[in-house]
């Protein structure tokens, strides 16, 4: 039963008073995100839709002003986790991350360090952004929108060694060779040495790598490589490393000069030029029979001169036992296969200042062919 309350004397409240709570009409200004005073947990925070965030690159999604550094870090970790879990794409992602970056900066918290913490199931947010990222061929070519990985990378530099290892692992898990090469070409990933940067230049693209997998059951593949300023880098840096993903493994093909303090047990003389093949972390062991091929560059350009093309340099890299990623202490596998240029009659000419195998643009064009099986014949890929 409802009992009408008698009006108080001189009560100023009108007989048709509005409710005690505020009703926000469609024409009234809405409350902005900066008015939110309480921290937002990762489990209950609702991310704004992408359609309502265009043009708000510096929008303040959440108010961190009255929070401690610990609260800011906790809230930021929750927001980043939500972005990765929901595969949230820009431009909303850029706005949220920018707001987090500004809040961290004002509270003396390193946003870059937060993004490089292994805070999500034992991995960094970058790892999960790569694992959940759509392959390049499935991306909409007409959409010129940067993805979440790009947004995270823009706030993560400089990357620590552990972070780069986590990124490599993610690229290997997805077998995303195109993405891996683009990351290696970015200055933030730090693929080249300081000497390489001086010789090649920070603004020039580094070595070009193209992987071709063949349709067979023996794991055959080939890699076309263009190495810039090969001779200068070998003589000064004394090491050139090429990394790529093929057949669900991450490979390292390295050209190097044997150091003066090298152990005599290796059987390699100090100063010798060598090429080596090895597997990188998280790659399963495998037999490998491969070769490095270097053709006469004049032949590849279709030279019409009367001189006969020179024979192709061939250096075979064949494992006597399964090739295994380091660290490895067993006796039934090897961690690398190495051959010296001296093992090939023509390869030593690559050390000469005017070698005909070095193109006029100072590039060495290499083709690497491999088959992941134990081979007894001389044929690698027929």
Image: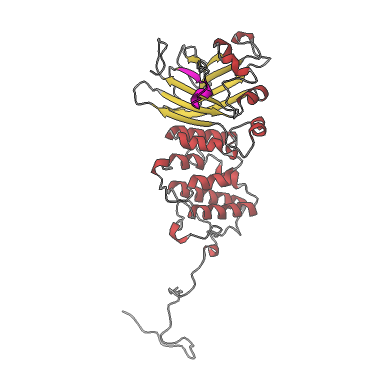
Q: Toward which corner of the image does residue 259 lie, by quadrant?
A: top right
Q: Is residue 72 above or below residue 22?
A: above
Asked if residue 49 shows in the view, the reply is no
Residue 350 x, y percent position in the rendering: 59, 18
Taking the spot 68% from the left edge, 15% from the top edge, the residue there is: 260
User: From which residue to which does the magenta span run?
Assistant: 290-305
Coloring scheme of the render?
A: secondary structure
Residue 300 x, y percent position in the rendering: 49, 25
Taking the spot 46% from the left edge, 11% from the top edge, the residue there is: 320
The residue lying toward the viewer, choosing from 307 and 195, is 307
Quarter occupied by the C terminus = top left
Asked if residue 84 shows in the view, the reply is yes
In reply to whether residue 324 is colored magenta, the answer given is no
Q: Is residue 149 above or below residue 344?
A: below
Q: Toward which corner of the image does residue 159 lie, by quadrant?
A: top right
Residue 247 x, y percent position in the rendering: 41, 27
Taking the spot 43% from the left edge, 35% from the top edge, the residue there is: 174
In reply to whether residue 291 is colored magenta, the answer given is yes
Q: Toward which corner of the image does residue 219 lie, by quadrant?
A: top left
Q: Is residue 9 above or below residue 239?
A: below
- Does residue 193 appear left or right of residue 120 in this picture? right
The residue lying toward the viewer, choosing from 193 and 10, is 193
The residue most toward the front is 306
């Amino acid at each position: 039963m409802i009992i009408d309350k008698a009006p108080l004397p001189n009560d100023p409240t009108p007989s048709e008073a509005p409710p005690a709570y505020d009703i926000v009409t469609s024409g009234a200004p809405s409350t902005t995100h900066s008015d939110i005073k309480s921290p937002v947990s990762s489990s209950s925070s609702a991310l704004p839709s992408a359609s309502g965030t265009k043009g708000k690159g510096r929008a303040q999604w959440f108010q961190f002003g009255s929070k401690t550094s610990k609260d800011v870090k906790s809230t930021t970790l929750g927001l980043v986790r939500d972005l990765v879990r929901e595969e949230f794409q820009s431009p909303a992602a850029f706005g949220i991350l920018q707001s987090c970056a500004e809040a961290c900066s004002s509270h003396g918290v390193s946003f870059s360090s937060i993004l490089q913490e292994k805070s999500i199931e034992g991995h960094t947010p970058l790892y999960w952004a790569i694992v959940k990222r759509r392959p390049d061929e499935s991306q909409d070519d007409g959409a010129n929108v940067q993805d979440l990985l790009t947004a995270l990378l823009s706030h993560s530099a400089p990357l620590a060694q552990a972070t780069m290892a986590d990124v490599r692992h993610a690229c290997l898990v997805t077998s995303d060779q195109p993405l891996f090469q683009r990351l290696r070409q970015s200055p933030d990933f730090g693929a080249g040495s300081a000497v390489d940067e001086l010789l090649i230049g920070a603004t020039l693209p580094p070595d070009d790598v193209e992987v071709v997998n063949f349709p067979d059951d023996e794991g055959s593949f080939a890699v076309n490589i263009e190495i810039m300023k090969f001779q200068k880098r070998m003589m000064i840096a004394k090491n050139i490393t090429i990394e790529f993903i093929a057949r669900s493994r991450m490979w390292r093909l390295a050209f190097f000069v044997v150091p003066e303090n090298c152990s005599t047990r290796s059987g390699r003389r100090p100063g010798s030029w060598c090429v080596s093949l090895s597997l990188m972390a998280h790659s399963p062991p495998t037999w490998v029979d491969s070769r490095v091929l270097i053709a006469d560059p004049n032949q590849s350009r279709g030279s019409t001169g009367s001189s006969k093309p020179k024979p192709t340099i061939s250096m075979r890299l064949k494992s006597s036992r399964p090739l295994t990623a380091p660290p490895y202490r067993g006796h039934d596998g090897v961690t690398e296969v190495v051959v010296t240029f001296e093992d090939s009659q023509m390869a030593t000419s690559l050390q000469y200042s005017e070698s005909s195998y070095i193109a006029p643009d100072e590039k060495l064009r290499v083709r690497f062919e491999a088959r992941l099986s134990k081979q007894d014949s001389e044929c690698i890929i027929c």
